[in-house]
Amino acid sequence: MGADSFVAFYGNRYDVGDADAADELNHSTDPRIASAKRSKLDVYVGRLTDGEPYFLLIGRKLGDFGIEGEYEKSFSAVDLAAVAEETQLLLNSCDLIGHPKFWFQLVAQY
C-alpha cells in the first residue's frame, strides 16, 4: 500500500506475527484461509505499519478507504445487520473460532 488507508471489515481478526508468518499464510494452505475461500468469505492480511505484527481478517470486507481507495461509503443499519447475520452463518459453517466484530483497521504508510 502506498498511502495511509484503512480497511472496514466484519468478521474475525487473528494475530499472525512477523513477516515470515504472514508469507506462510500467502504461500501455504492455511486451513482458515482455505475454508474461508471455499465459503466465499473475504480474507485480508495486513499490518498497522512497518515493524508491527501482521493480522488476518476473515469475513466480509466492507471497503478500503483512503487516498488509493474509497473516500466514503454508507450502509443502513439493516444492511449492516444483514452483513453480520450472513457472515456469522458462513463463519460458523467454516468452524472458524472467534467472535466476529466490525473492524476499522488503519494500515499506515510504510
Image: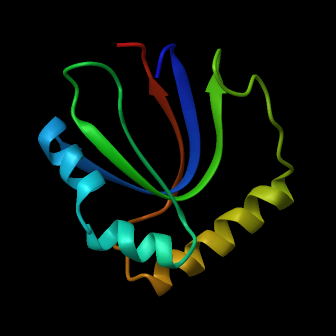
Horizontal and vertical percent position of residue 46? 37, 37
Q: Quadrant of the C terminus?
A: top left
Q: Residue at x 43, y 81 (%)?
A: 94
Q: Is residue 3 left or right of residue 8?
A: left
Between residues 30 and 73, which one lies in front from this camera angle?
30
Residue at position x 33%, y 70% in the image:
32
Q: Residue at x 56, y 78 (%)?
A: 90
Q: Residue furthest front?
A: 27
Q: Quadrant of residue 85?
A: bottom right
Image position of 109 (left or right of 70):
left
In the depicted structure, whether residue 14 falls above or below residue 82: above
The answer, for residue 18, to whether it is visible in the render is no
* Picture layout, residue 44 above or below residue 107: below
Residue 69 horizontal side relative to residue 59, left or right: right
Q: Residue furthest bottom?
A: 93
Q: Position of residue 35 (x, y in %)?
A: 40, 77
Q: Is residue 10 above or below residue 68?
A: below
Q: Nearer the viewer, residue 23 or 56?
A: 23
